[in-house]
Amino acid sequence: MRLLRLWPDESHFDFMRFRRLTFPLSAVLSIATVVLFLTVGLNFGIDFKGGTLVELQAKSGEANVAEIRHTANGFGFGEAEVQELSGQGNVLVRLPLQAGEQGQTAVMQKAHAAFDAGYDFRRTETVGPRVSGELVQSGTIGVVLSVVAVLLYLWFRFERELALGAIVGTLHDIVLTVGIFIITRIEFNMTSIAAILTIVGYSLNETVVVFDRTRELMRRYKTIPTVELLNLSINSTMSRTVMTSISSSLALLSLVLFGGEAIHGFATVMLAGVVICTYSAIFVSTPALIYIGLMLSGVKSAQRESGLPQAAE
């Protein structure tokens, strides 16, 4: 029985010719992300910046978001963020962090006084400055250590040039994923850290599959031109790449559409991350080997002995 193939087995598509377009594009997007990170910044959630989060359910079944925002801003605690969660009267209210326990208590007292008549309080969360600061520190350390561990794995897993190409692709995927958070203004919280680490794992998986085939072909065809070798590596693994990316994207798309507000941000970032990682494995990390200077084993000695390019086997 023949297995399903979404990419022709004997394909000879020239992916490397797009490197002159994809490399400048990725560089511009990465630089723009860094600039936006330094100027605009992430939309930190209550986990990281502290404050009070209240989820309200309208007793009538329909919430007046404008009225809730006006009332919450009138508390005198700073600008409140009000977000409608669904069409069934669910509203999420975020109130700024107040100094001291008495300040936080005053926030809840005013919230109950203002909304008890028309809304049920479904959820209340309060994060103080000390806790939010510890979460920021722990989350940052966790991400950094995880990325360092992945980079060390890549360094020992592959030859020097392949390891450098994989590292370039992984860092590229992390930067662009952060850019998705900045552009969409999806709340960055502890769940977002889980999304970034998951994307790092997916990126690593995509890159390792292609580079394993590259290393196998390097041993088989010792004098094949680098561009031809890399095209052959991508084409020979493309069916698997397409199958993995499509199945992952369909699962994540269903979560985006039907998973509810609680995981909508996580699923959206993961969906974008799958697209970024697939693009990166084909058009960033693999072409990077050309610029890094991938030297096939045996080429130097063959050229030194004959002084001429050797024919591929």
Image (spheres, rainbow, N blue to C red):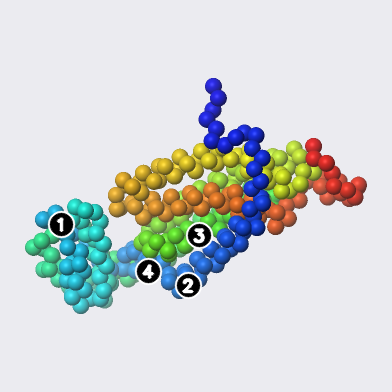
Q: Are marks 3 and 1 in contact (CB under 8 Å)?
A: no
Closer to the camera: disc 4 or disc 2?
A: 2
Closer to the camera: disc 4 or disc 1?
A: 1
Local crowd size for mark 2, using a 10 Å CA cut-off: few (<14), some (14–19), many (≥20): few
Q: Position of residue 103 (x, y in %)?
A: 21, 74
Amino acid type at mark 3: Leu
The answer to whether any part of residue 166 appears in the image is no
For the residues marked 4 and 1, what is the alpha-carbon distance in whole angstroms?
A: 36 Å
Label for residue 176?
3
Which mark is first along the chain, 2 or 1? 2
Question: Residue at coordinates 53% horizontally, 56% vertically from top-left?
Answer: 173
Hey, which quadrant is residue 61 in on the image? bottom left
Which mark is first along the chain, 3 or 4? 4
Label for residue 62?
1
Question: Residue at coordinates 40% horizontally, 42% vertically from top-left?
Answer: 251
Q: Nearer the viewer, residue 81 or 62?
A: 62
Could you say whether the residue bearing mark 3 is in a helix, strand or loop? helix
Could you say whether the residue bearing mark 4 is in a helix, strand or loop? helix
Residue at the far top in the pictured view: 1
Could you say whether the residue bearing mark 1 is in a helix, strand or loop? loop
Q: Position of residue 65 (x, y in %)?
A: 20, 64
Q: Nearer the viewer, residue 170 or 9?
A: 9
Provide the residue designation for mark 4.
133
